[in-house]
Amino acid sequence: MKKALKVIGIIAAVAGAIFGVYVIVKKYVDSKKVVIGNDAENYVSCSCCDDNFVSETVA
């Protein structure tokens, strides 16, 4: 019985450590996200998607 409780305790400790790392990484990633005002204002079109696009590269 003691051995089973020891195994369950080890599994719980490992799961807790993994969860702690997850929370720390999530907070770090969320803090690095930059909120940019208006997406339409910062939009840059890609001319390569236009129907009349002519590539300047030589194959």
Image (cartoon, rainbow, N blue to C red):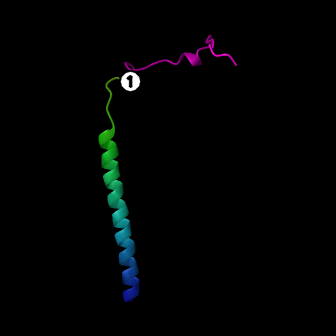
The quarter of the picture where the N terminus appears is: bottom left
Highlighted range, magenta: 39-59
Left or right of 34? Residue 50 is right
Left or right of 37? Residue 54 is right
User: Magenta span: helix, strand or loop, mainly?
Assistant: loop
Of residues 41 and 18, the one nearer the viewer is: 18
From this viewpoint, which residue is outermost toward the bottom? 1
Magenta residue check for 53: yes
- Amino acid type assigned to the residue bearing label 1 in the image: Asp
The image quarter in which residue 37 lies:
top left
* Location of mark 1 (residue): 39
The quarter of the picture where the C terminus appears is: top right
Q: Position of residue 14 (x, y in %)?
A: 38, 69
Q: Residue at x 37, y 18 (%)?
A: 41
Q: Position of residue 54 (x, y in %)?
A: 63, 11
The image quarter in which residue 47 lies:
top right
Residue 13 lies, with reference to residue 52, above or below; the image says: below
Q: Position of residue 42 (x, y in %)?
A: 38, 20
Residue 6 lies, with reference to residue 59, above or below; the image says: below
SS of the residue under disc 1? loop
